[in-house]
Image: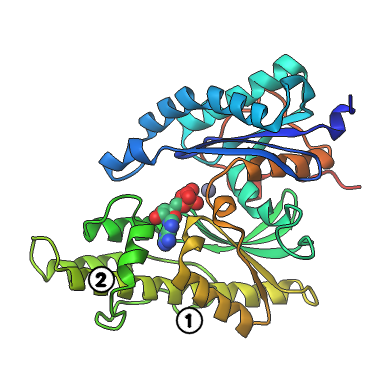
Amino acid sequence: MDPVGMRPVLGIESSCDETAAAVLDRDGRILSALVASQEREHAPYGGVVPEIAARTHLALLPGLVRRAMAEAGLDFAALGGVAATTGPGLIGGLIVGSQVGKGIALSRGLPFVAVNHLEAHALTARLPGLVAGNVPFPYMLLLISGGHCQCIAVEGVGKHVRLGGTVDDAAGEAFDKVAKLLGLPWPGGPALERLATEGDPRRFGFPRPMLGRAGCDFSFSGLKTAVAHAVAEFGSGALERQVAADVAAGFQAAVAAVLADRAGHAMALFADRYPGTPGLLVVAGGVAANGAIRTALTAATAARGFHLAVPPPALCTDNAVMVAWAGIERLRLGLTDGLEIAPRPRWPLQDLAEPAAG
Ligand code: KG4
Ligand code: ZN
């Protein structure tokens, strides 16, 4: 059998409402990748309920891991390491995922990697075959999900510089809240995008918070309030479909403009910081699935001479492939974690362990 350092790695993700397990070989080839969405469990509550998420992870994860191993055609004895998301996220799910990972590592005497969920999103672009040229460091990451909205310069494994981020809501959170105001089911982003196709984005002149402001911070709460006021003007009943569509289109256009503007500033900061480096903007997170946002980001990157890379949706939203891959990147540098490491609901990228010099 291959030495441990060449054997496949199991990845586990359970930081929010996706239960996921994946097995990758050491070259990053995906041997299996499973995601069980908990959308059905949380939808009646209009958002993720932490206690339900923790219980659902506990119910689903052991079976999912076994299936991921079976689909990879491997026995646990064939693994060379286990990587599990250990933060940031909801503590219940983090405990379930990291304990399952540690248990497998302990019983097989395998190295364990405590993966930071944000670093996993950040390193996904380096998965072989995803982006032409295999994405050398440094590059820019725009992370736009339900829980995160940040511009990060990815300098290396464990080396990330946060250039800016939201001062209030995440972009996906804003989509979900506005969708709720429009009576759309949770999670609201995809339904809002569909409705917006029927709407006139110019009917409501919604604000574009932070547009043109120095740096690359974001703010979405003022935009959300403006939408709430516009909707309230139409009384308390259900909105006429055309009104709802116009609101959706106007809101989406505002978010797209803001994201393009802020990403533009981030690219300028990046170019100043790393002169002579080819410009690459990688977009991750569920909001990257939005067509209008993608179009706006395509124009913004072209205007700055940057390339735009958007991984396929299944790798943009929460998944375990990215966790296994981040584990492989860390294992290659000899970075492993002791089983005493505790899950961290808050775990900023700046706090990550860097590889030792040399
Ligand atoms: O990355 P993700 O799957 O999970 C985390 O938040 O970690 O992102 C989910 C978010 C939700 O807020 C959802 O409404 C949003 O991404 N989203 C979208 C679209 N698809 C998903 N937002 C706008 N347009 C979409 N097509
Ligand atoms: Zn995520």
Q: Which label number is shown at residue 117? A: none
Q: Is mark 2 within 8 Å of ligand 1?
A: no
The answer for how far apart the CA atoms under marks 1 and 2 are is 27 Å
Q: Residue at x 11, y 70 (%)?
A: 234
Marking on residue 245: 2
Whole-percent x, y for residue 141 in the image: 62, 62
Image location (x, y in percent) of residue 12: 61, 34
Q: In which quadrant will I find the N terminus?
A: top right
Residue 11 at x, y percent in the picture: 65, 35
- Foreground pick, 174 / 221: 174
Q: Nearer the viewer, mark 1 or mark 2?
A: 2
From the viewer's perspective, is 307 left or right of 46?
right
- Give the residue displayed 87% in from the left and 47% down from the top: 357
Q: How many marks?
A: 2
Q: In this image, 48 relative to 281: left or right? A: left
Q: Residue furthest top?
A: 107
Q: Which mark is residue 212?
A: 1
Counting residues from the N terminus, which is met first, the one under dot 1 or under dot 2? 1
> What amino acid type is highlighted by mark number 2?
Ala
For mark 2, give the secondary structure.
Answer: helix
Relative side of 312 to 89, left or right: right
The answer to whether residue 44 is seen in the rendering is: yes
Residue 246 locus on image (x, y percent): 25, 75
- The picture quadrant where one finds residue 283 is bottom right
On screen, residue 99 above or below 89: above
Q: Would you say residue 353 is visible in this rendering?
A: no
Instruction: Kindly state the secondary structure of the residue where label 1 is placed.
Output: loop
- The foreground one among 15 and 211 is 15
